[in-house]
Amino acid sequence: MNASPFREFLRSCYKNLNFIVGFIMLLSVILTAAFAPKIAPYYFEGGNPNAKFTSPCPEYILGTDNMGRDLFSRIVYGTRITLKVALIGGTIQLFLGVVVGLFCGFYGGVVDRFMLFFADLTWCVPGMVMALAVVTVIGSNLTNAIIAIALVNWASMARTVRAKTMSLKNMAFIETGVAFGESNLALMFRYILPNIVPALIVMVSMSLPGTIMSTTTLSFLGVGSQPPSPDWGLMVSDGIKYITKAPWLAIYPGLALVYTVLSFTILGEGLRDLLDPRMKSLG
């Protein structure tokens, strides 16, 4: 008896080392964020004035900062900010990339040239410079930083969706939909979109590390999260001021950021191998 497609997929997952390692790493980040109040021994804003710059010890396992706040607790709560960045940033990029890519690829002509013009604009200016300009206009906070990065990074996804839409729109199943009187929107979202979902999953998972790093960079520069937020970029920025006196303030948030970004990267590579191996040539 032949195995079901779902069992075949699970079997492929078990054999994919990148997927397994990335999934376990990302799951640990998600669980840390979900149970942050249970894991962190202190609240991230709480500080002990008598314990400023305490080096790692049994009471403060990663030490304390210049306000006597437990660094471990702040890093644990910071996982929630990082996952918020990934969720909101990925959703905005996915929405813009899918809508623009589908319309450009399906209609072509003037619509294609008009929409791709805006996509090309995002590549004319370095991403971080444009993100800084957007944040300057709409205001400095975490949500605005996420929006700014998403508005800069959606173009590559739109181009990939456009290319796949153009390759699918003349296939037989689309002609069948036209024969049954389906509208253009139905053809795009009911016929074409389901066929590019695997590629979309891969593209989103591969773009999230860059989204997280870019948003963290904005916080590092002071135009993202604002104090007393436990944002890792903000913590690294503050820790650098005391790098010779208390190096742990910059080292441990940096390691947490590396671990989280690496988990998304490894998982994305595993998903690429499983769902859309042809995208290896685009990496």
Image (spheres, rainbow, N blue to C red):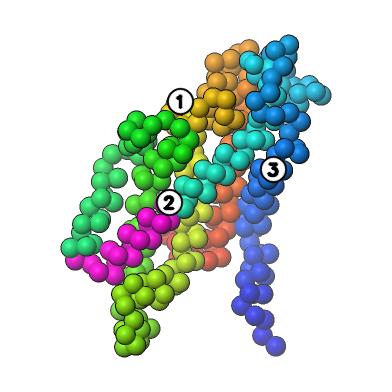
Left or right? Give the position of 53 relative to 144. Answer: right
The residue singled out by tag 2 in the image is 92
Q: Residues within 10 Å of mark 1 (few under 14, many from 20)?
A: some
Q: Amino acid at mark 3?
A: Thr
The N terminus lies in quadrant: bottom right
- In-front residue for pair 19/182: 182
The residue singled out by tag 3 in the image is 32
Q: Image point 37% across, 75% down: which residue?
A: 186
Q: In the drawing, what numbered circle is on residue 222?
A: 1
Q: Place residue 232 in its image quadrant.
A: top right
Left or right? Give the position of 220 relative to 249. Answer: left
The residue most toward the left is 110
Q: Over which residues does the magenta segment extend?
A: 92-109
102 in relation to 224, above or below: below
Q: Residues within 10 Å of mark 2 (few under 14, many from 20)?
A: some
Q: Position of residue 144 (x, y in %)?
A: 42, 38
